[in-house]
């Protein structure tokens, strides 16, 4: 995450002109496996839970990386708000095995 990307996340607000962008921030992760049934392959991956600054909405993103390779994970990104779930539903899928993202405070 570059300073410019983080600054852009800080300045994004959904507008009335059809722009549906909203900043989301990494708060939790879990290790898992991504399977590709077509290619019949699978590999290590980290799922990351991202939430909006108000904590009301969330999304999940999978990264095909080894456990603990956090430098390859976006700390924040600009999401289309139409693709976000209510935090309760998304977080429930994460809760049983989630760990805080390394940069989320105590």
Image (cartoon, rainbow, N blue to C red):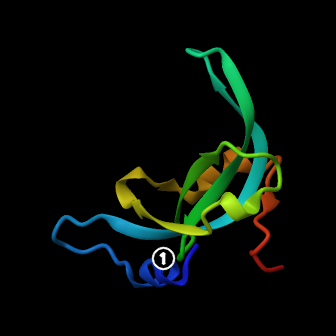
- The picture quadrant where one finds residue 53 is bottom right
Which is more toward the observer, 102 or 71? 71
Q: Is residue 89 visible?
A: no
**Residue drawn at 68 percent across, 44 percent down:** 93
Task: Using the image, determine if residue 2 lies above or below residue 31.
Answer: below
Element under disc 1: helix
Farthest residue toward the left? 17
Which is more toward the observer, 93 or 22? 22
Numbered disc total: 1
Residue 86 percent location from the top left of the image: 51, 56
**Residue drawn at 72 percent across, 46 percent down:** 65
Q: Which residue is mark 1?
A: 5
Quarter placement of the N terminus: bottom right
Residue 57 percent location from the top left of the image: 51, 62
Which is more toward the observer, 97 or 26? 26
Residue 44 percent location from the top left of the image: 76, 37
**Residue drawn at 56 percent across, 69 percent down:** 76
Quarter placement of the C terminus: bottom right
Task: Using the image, determine if residue 20 lies above or below residue 66.
Answer: below
Q: Is residue 15 left or right of residue 32?
A: left
Callout 1: 10 Å neighbours few (<14), some, many (20+)? some
Q: Is residue 34 visible?
A: yes
Residue 11 percent location from the top left of the image: 39, 84
Q: Is residue 103 left or right of residue 60?
A: right
């Amino acid at each position: 995450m570059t300073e410019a990307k983080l600054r852009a996340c800080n300045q994004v607000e959904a507008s009335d002109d059809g722009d549906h962008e909203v900043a989301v921030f990494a708060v939790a992760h879990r290790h898992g496996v991504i399977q590709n049934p077509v290619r019949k392959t699978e590999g290590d991956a980290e799922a990351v839970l991202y939430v909006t600054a108000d904590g009301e909405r969330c999304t999940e993103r999978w990264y095909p990386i080894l456990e603990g390779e956090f430098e390859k994970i976006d700390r924040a990104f600009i999401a289309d708000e139409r693709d976000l779930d209510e935090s309760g539903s998304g977080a429930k899928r994460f809760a049983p095995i989630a760990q805080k993202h390394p940069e989320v405070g105590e």
